[in-house]
Image (cartoon, rainbow, N blue to C red):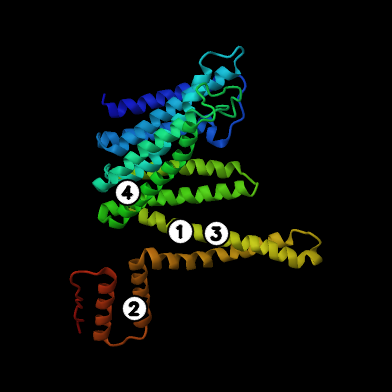
Amino acid sequence: MRAGLIVPLVAIGLAALGLLLTAMQTAGPQRGTFAQPWLNVLYTVAFAALAALVLRREPRHAIGWIFAVVALTGGAVQVLQEYALLAYSARPPLSGGVWAAWLPHWAWFGEIVLLMIVLPVVFPTGRPLTTRWRSVLWLAVAAFVLTAASTALAPGPLSDATPEFSNPVAIADSPVRQLLGAAAPAVLFISIAAAVASLIVRFRRARGVERQQMKWIVYALFVLAAAFGASATLFLTGRPSAFAESAMALALLLVPVATAIAILRYRLYDIDLLIRRTAVYGATTAAIAATFYLGIVGLQAILRPLTSGSELAVAASTLVAFALFQPVRRRVQDAVDRRFDRARYDAAHTLDTFADGLRDEVDLDALRSELIGSVTRTMAPAHASLWLRESRR
């Protein structure tokens, strides 16, 4: 069996072992959404499956190995975290629990560096755009080393779930640790900015198939940014939502899925339709939601003296939002077609114009010229001609 399949299988085995350790815990600690065992297993299995798909088709493709390493790291982190929690909750505590909590404390930065820096630099060919962009990969290495070292040496509890497990190799306030703490965020930020710049430059230069591949990753990043913005807004306003956090967590999976689709070129050109539909229904939903919210606020202010706090404003806003859905959707569809599918919009406009003129046209030669002109403008054939059979008298 090839190494490209062995590594994903090992990662899935580690994820299964992590679930077993979770089941062995008598009392589960409080976890956030991103620390749920099911989510960690889902990430590991998803990356492992995508790595196997890519490496089965292209065994030396760098992106397939990035997915494989991320899956393997995720599985190992899952096992170590769950063992640390098991060791912490056991009475007496199990040996090695502190070190099992310490390793994931900094190792997960490797996944962040691979997905946020290395992946954008080598997507979709598996190589940097030019030799000049290879320096970003060295920046990624430096970012991981500095960030991991700064975290691994920081004093204090290793996690909120294990407050009594303190860092066993912590270094108190010293010039070295202060230098690491200052340099790590700066190098990490510069590396991510350079990776995004590489992605933008490659997108602007891409043509044909590579252009479609770039659209997939840009679409996934846009959805991820929207989910992150919604989750962050709810968090900052003091109304964190488990649903928003789960949507954010699942949106993270869209990036590797879109990457695998682009690499394997499966239904590659469906991205244009996906972008148009997302734009149409996203903008329509936002417009209807704004109408509904403003309608409730406005009508409640107007009708409060008359209705004495009844639900009339909510009912009226619901009816207005329902009535506006189709008109708003049509207008948004026209705007999206003009922006993203100009050829389709121009063709529909040409056919509508031809149909309007057809009702009043009586000259056969003029009708023939209009028909050929409409076909030429909509279909853009190399040659167009019209044959009319002579009527028998």
Q: Where does label 1 land, which residue?
A: 279
First along the sequence among labels 4 and 3 = 4
Which residue is at the front of the view, 61 or 329?
61
Residue 13 drawn at (x, y percent) = 41, 23
Residue 260 position by quadrant:
top left
C-alpha separation, residue under disc 2 versus residue under disc 3: 35 Å
Q: Where does label 4 land, which residue?
A: 267
Residue 279 drawn at (x, y percent) = 45, 59
First along the sequence among labels 4 and 2 = 4
Rendered position, 319 above or below 258: below
Residue reaching furthest to the front: 175
Q: Residues within 10 Å of mark 2 (few under 14, many from 20)?
A: some
Residue type, label 3: Ala
Secondary structure, mark 4, is: loop
Which residue is at the front of the view, 283 or 60?
60
Residue 46 drawn at (x, y percent) = 41, 35
Residue type, label 1: Ala
C-alpha separation, residue under disc 4 versus residue under disc 3: 29 Å
C-alpha separation, residue under disc 1 versus residue under disc 3: 10 Å
Q: Is residue 323 visible?
A: yes
Q: Where does label 2 land, which residue?
A: 354
Secondary structure, mark 3, is: helix
Residue 161 position by quadrant:
top right
